[in-house]
Image (tube, rainbow, N blue to C red):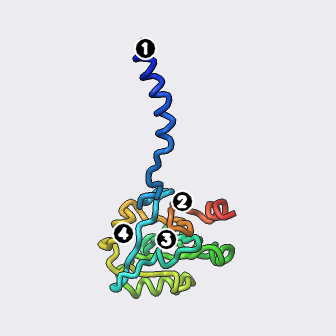
Amino acid sequence: MRSFKSYFLLLLILIPLTAYVTKDVRPEEGLTPGSFAPEIQIDENGKELLSSMRGKYLLLQFWAAYDGESRMNNLLLYNSIKRHYANRVHNLSLSFDTNRTIFEETVSADGMDPNTQLNVVQGENSDVYRNYNLSNGYTNYLIDPNGVVVAKNVSPQKLNEILN
């Protein structure tokens, strides 16, 4: 009986001490809120796009001219950021159109700033497409100033809720 009390007392002392053992709390890279957004490199120099845009929120959008829903969402969010959040949010949209002319004509027809629109000419064969698991459809991500995913599939209304 005495040894049971000793073990019990030892457990009472050790269990609270385990709360002080810390592990690395740095988020993992991934696509869910709370994860670091996977880095994107689309030029031959290997420039990391997301790292270069830290310091503000970033709305990262994926679209293609042939996908009407993604194109409409891209335009709605682009206009919302331009009107209400230009000083707080970077906008970066990646098109997966393999035909550069179609991409350029779509950006022009939609009245978008070509500096916020990039074309991934490898389309569905690109690392970006695979890393962001876009086989389930085009989407967007709101990323905080530190590179952490805050939300996925953001609408203009959801953007307003998060930022205000």
* Residue at the extreme top of the image, as rendered: 1
Specify the quadrant of the image occupied by residue 3: top left
Separation (CA) of disc 3 from disc 1: 66 Å
Q: Earlier in the sequence, mark 2 or mark 3?
A: 3
Separation (CA) of disc 2 from disc 1: 55 Å
| Tag 2: amino acid | Ala
Q: Secondary structure at mark 2?
A: strand
The number of numbered badges drawn on the structure is: 4
| Tag 1: amino acid | Arg
- Say which residue label 1 marks: 2
Drawn side of residue 157 relative to residue 68, left or right = right
Separation (CA) of disc 3 from disc 4: 12 Å
13 in relation to 141, above or below: above
103 in relation to 85, above or below: below
Separation (CA) of disc 4 from disc 2: 18 Å
- Say which residue label 3 marks: 61
Q: Secondary structure at mark 1?
A: helix
Taking the spot 62% from the left edge, 65% from the top edge, the residue there is 156
Residue mark closest to the camera, 2 vs 1: 1
Give the quadrant of the N terminus.
top left
Specify the quadrant of the image occupied by residue 120: bottom left
42 in relation to 128, above or below: below
Spot occupied by residue 157 in the image (x, y as percentages of width and height): 64, 62
- Say which residue label 4 marks: 129
Separation (CA) of disc 2 from disc 3: 12 Å
Kindly check if marks 4 and 1 are in contact, taking CB atoms under 8 A apart as contact. Answer: no
- Say which residue label 2 marks: 151
- In the image, which disc is placed on residue 134? none
86 in relation to 101, above or below: above
